[in-house]
Image (cartoon, helix red, strand yellow):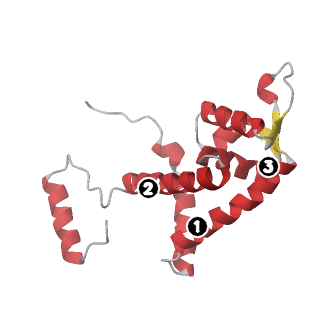
């Protein structure tokens, strides 16, 4: 989906106007973000599984725990934007491998604190090198100013999600 020349953009806009029921997948931002995220995740997961025997969700949980030091599973799910079941499966895998410790159940099982173990921190420190190199390669096609703009725009898009996800009133 390479960038189109000005004439091609004009033709595409005309085609969209004539066929408003079709998505222009070269310009539909939610689709472009999804395609990019899916392909990045698939590539990262393949590397992490091969090199570290962990999947992308396991890495994301570990990366968050490196930042938060200790937290609860519900907060991990909220921050990562995934279902609690995804976090639960990752935590079970990480605990079996001795990479996280989870407090014993108390009266409030939801308040069980999770933290990286020393082994988890050590593995995190090796995995982050791979993550940062992949980021460097991804952003290599952008100037420093473009990178700063991209991060700013992504932050603004993220902040707009509550409005985007608000129920729509459809006349169907």
Tell which tag, 2 or 1, sits nearer the viewer: 1
Q: Position of residue 15 (x, y in %)?
A: 15, 59
View extreme (front): residue: 50
In-image side of 100 versus 149 (left or right): right
Residue placed at 47% from the left, 38% from the top? 166
Residue placed at 20% from the left, 64% from the top? 12
Identify the residue position indicated by label 1 in the image.
Answer: 135
In the rendered structure, find residue 33 and report the number of the disc placed on it: 2
Q: Count up the numbered dots.
A: 3
Q: Residues within 10 Å of mark 1 (few under 14, many from 20)?
A: few
**Distance of mark 1 from mark 3, alpha carbons?**
22 Å
Q: Position of residue 151 (x, y in %)?
A: 57, 66
Q: Looking at the picture, tell me which residue is in the foreground, 159 or 145.
A: 145
Residue placed at 37% from the left, 52% from the top? 31
**Distance of mark 2 from mark 3, alpha carbons?**
30 Å
In-image side of 10 versus 72 (left or right): left
Identify the residue position indicated by label 3 in the image.
Answer: 120
Q: Is residue 144 above or below residue 12?
A: below
**Distance of mark 2 from mark 1, alpha carbons?**
15 Å
Q: Looking at the picture, tell me which residue is in the foreground, 149 or 160.
A: 149
In the rendered structure, find residue 84 and report the number of the disc placed on it: none
- Of mark 2 and mark 3, the one earlier in the sequence is 2
> Would residue 2 be visible to someone looking at this image?
yes
């Amino acid at each position: 989906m390479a960038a189109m020349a000005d004439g091609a953009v004009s033709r595409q806009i005309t085609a969209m106007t004539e066929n408003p029921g079709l998505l222009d997948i070269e310009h539909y931002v939610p689709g472009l973000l999804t395609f990019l995220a899916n392909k990045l995740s698939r590539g990262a997961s393949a590397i992490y599984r091969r090199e570290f025997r962990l999947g992308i969700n396991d890495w994301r949980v570990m990366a968050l725990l490196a930042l938060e030091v200790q937290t609860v599973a519900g907060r991990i799910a909220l921050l990562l934007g995934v279902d609690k079941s995804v976090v639960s499966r990752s935590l079970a895998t990480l605990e079996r491998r001795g990479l996280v410790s989870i407090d014993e159940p108390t009266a409030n099982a939801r308040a069980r604190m999770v933290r990286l173990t020393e082994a988890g921190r050590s593995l995190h420190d090796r995995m982050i090198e791979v993550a940062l190199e992949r980021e460097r390669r991804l952003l290599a096609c952008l100037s420093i100013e473009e990178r700063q703009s991209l991060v700013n725009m992504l932050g603004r898009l993220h902040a707009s999600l509550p409005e985007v996800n608000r129920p729509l009133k459809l006349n169907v």
